[in-house]
Amino acid sequence: MATYSTNEFKGGLKLLLDGDPMSIVENEFVKPGKGQAFNRVKLRNLRTGRVVEKTFKSGESVEAADVLETEMQYLYNDGEFWHFMTPESFEQYAVSKAALNGAEQWLKEQDMCTVTLWNGEPLSVEAPAFVELQITQCDPGIRGDTAQGGTKPATLETGAVVKVPLFVEEGESIKVDTRTGEYVSRV
Amino acid sequence: MSDWRPRAGGARVARARLLAELRGFFARRGVLEVETPVLGRGTVLDPAIESWHARSGDRADRMEGWLQTSPEYPMKRLLADGAGDIYQIARVFRGGESGARHNPEFSLLEWYRLGLDDRTLADEVVTLLQEVAAADPAWHAPDPGPRVVAYPDLLHEALGVDVLHDDAARLQAVAAQRGLTVHGELDRDAWLDALVSLCVVPEFPPGRVTILHDYPESQAILARRSRERPGCAARFEVYWGDLELANGYFELTDPAEFRRRREQDRALRRARGQPEPAADPFLEAALEAGLPDCAGVALGVDRLLMRLLGEDDIRRVIDFPWGCA
């Protein structure tokens, strides 16, 4: 069983606490000059996404969470699960909608994603930061409105809806920032 | 490739100015600047402080020693020899201490005054803070009028804790009521530290200086017993806002009591499985020869600089903090 001592704590370290895998967001060292040292730690629960704060007596050891981030290719959706594959081993993983947590709206078959595995089970999926997707439906733009910087909703081939500038037309491909869900440019 | 560049920026010039101001403060009061070794044959056994062990190599003629965690012991030898009022701006080293308010190597201003006690020396610390802060109009100054409060009173007011009688389980329950649980087992003093550091001190008013005095005797370190308050020690700390700046004592002069506390520290280290460094071999004899009645205090210069400049992270006032040192 791998463990980490509090003096190894730093952002991104994965710990197993209360039965859940957690990632350190922030680690604060608190110590009175002549007294006991503590680590006040903010952790993201990788299963629920919630951020919790915990206090450790410095010098304590905590079990490491067997969490692995792997690049995988998105294959297809069977209606219930989204299927991914590691390109090296061709090993396939079925991911639930809960674990995808909205990432599915950006995924096109063949796209590469970061899949986080905990004890070999998919825990979460991160879509690529930028994706290029085709607009399948949006109202026609009105000439002359470009200067006002107005926007309109556009439905993409994956089903996601993003706000696009008025000059962007149905059938065009656009670049989207998946972290904010915002339009970046035409492709 | 790691970043070679220094980090302190404008704090570099402020530090030079601060050091000059500190030296001026003591020169005006006739306190003598001294130097004592950074590297010594022994060190403190205080279980809350980890010393750095230094070796010169692995040949048969290698030398070894301990980096000082404060200049306290050799300065007391100077006092026992009749040096009178003395101060030092020392480089000190503490293992395992690194973060927004800790650097494992830092500058400690330590001074001793004959004829003062814990309370009058605490007043001098406040005077020093005010005088130094006034040196540069761009610097932050502490709000006038420090808050002076006894440790047991503070914990009683803030948390309803009876510092001298509540046991570890009761302190743990008080912490739990405040939403504080700690992973790892804490003894009574560690729970007191947790309550003070994590519940009470963060609520200290930001611009104001707080003098916390009459620490429980179990945390006396090298302070003598308090005359006014049974069960307490003549020890104080000075905070600026929620930042601990200084720790001082009406100094213990009794060699038998010094030996007793040192053996207690040694026993505690053994019980906890902590490493046991070589003990300083000289202070005990100096106490036997006679330490004059005096009060002493150590103040973190880097932290003072943080407050003067309004910085929240010690790594922004040190050019080469741990990690790029």
Image (cartoon, coloured by chain):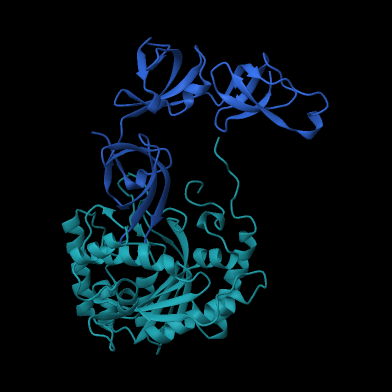
Chain colours: A blue, B cyan
Q: Is A145 on the left-hand or right-hand side of B131?
A: right
Of A26 and A121, nearer the camera is: A121
Residue lying at 23% horizontally and 54% vertically, measured from the top left: B274
Number of numbered callouts drawn? 0
| Vertical relation: B54 (above or below) A24 | below
* Residue B247 pos. (x, y %): 39, 73
Q: Position of residue B182 (x, y in %)?
A: 28, 54
Among the 4 quarters of the image, the one containing residue A186: top right
Which residue is situated farthest in the top direction here?
A90
Residue B52 seen by the camera: no
Figure check: B323 above or below A131: below
Q: Which of B26 and B208 is in front in this view?
A: B208
Residue A113: x and y, percent? Answer: 47, 21
Tell me which corner region of the image, top left, top right, bottom left or bottom right, holds residue A179: top right
**One can see residue A84 in this view:** yes
Across and down, in percent, residue B36 comes to 43, 69
* Residue B266 in the image: above or below residue B27: above
Q: In this view, does B42 lie to the left or right of B260?
A: right
What residue is rendered at 37% in x and 44% in y?
Answer: A9
Q: At 45% across and 15% down in the image, what residue appears?
A: A74
Q: In which quarter of the image is residue B202?
A: bottom left
Q: Pick the quarter of the image with the N terminus of chain A.
A: top left
Of residues A45 and A161, the one drawn nearer to the viewer in this rendering: A161
Residue at the farthest right position = A144
Which quadrant of the figure contains the C terminus of chain A? Answer: top right
Q: Which of B208 and B263 is in front in this view?
A: B208
Left or right: where B270 falls relative to B59: left
